[in-house]
Image (cartoon, grey):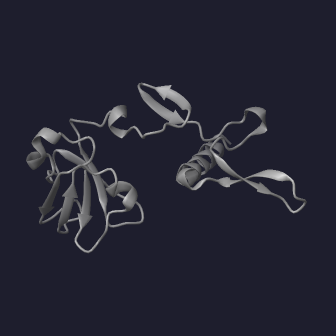
Amino acid sequence: MYFQPRGETLPAEYRDRCGNGITEIHAGPNDKPGDIFGGQAYDRSNTAYRCKYFPKQQSWRQIPKTECWIGYYVDELPSPEDLERDSIFPGHCERGWTIPLARDFTNGRECNLPVAMDVDADGKWKRGDVKDDYKDLWEIAVKWWDYIGQSAE
């Protein structure tokens, strides 16, 4: 589920995943009035109940760089099928979840995500920047690698 306080706009990448359920509430996870949208994992057969704010039954987290929140019922965790995208990037499978392989150190390649091709000053082809659809994942992978690299020292 997603919470959008009044006067705020849920980012498009989250709004695109909302189901048909929507409920106006007086106070959400940040004690502000707004709307709760049903996400893909909610029970569509009971939207009147599912798209509500129950702080003792749900877990909520603020969406970074916004005033909006994402939440779920703690007794009904989303499954891999609930969160699966149309196309899945290759990776490692762990308990039904595909964990994308963003960094690959075989064959000297550091970034395993799709990149744009570019040319250097001499006109030779080179790998360019990570494609827009994968930039957020790449930033997370870089931060994670920096974190585990420092902790290994």
75 vs 139: above or below: above
Quadrant in the picture for residue 41? top left
- Image point (42%, 40%), residue name: 85
Farthest right residue in view:
122
Question: Which x, y percent locates residue 126?
Answer: 80, 51
71 vs 10: above or below: above
In this rendering, would 140 be left or right of 25?
A: right
In this rendering, would 116 be left or right of 70?
A: right
- Image point (54%, 49%), residue name: 137
Task: Name the one closer to the observer, 56 or 10.
Answer: 10
Quadrant in the picture for residue 27? bottom left
Task: Name the one closer to the observer, 153 or 101.
Answer: 101
Question: Which x, y percent locates residue 143?
Answer: 58, 51
Task: Name the one closer to the observer, 28 or 51.
Answer: 51
Quadrant in the picture for residue 80? top left
In this rendering, would 2 be left or right of 142?
A: left
Q: How many numbered marks does the figure carry?
A: 0
Quadrant where the C terminus sits is: top right
Question: Which x, y percent locates residue 26?
Answer: 12, 66
- Image point (32%, 63%), residue name: 10
Farthest bottom residue in view:
7
In this rendering, would 117 be left or right of 100?
A: right
Question: Which x, y percent locates residue 8?
Answer: 29, 71
Task: Name the one closer to the observer, 28 or 85.
Answer: 85
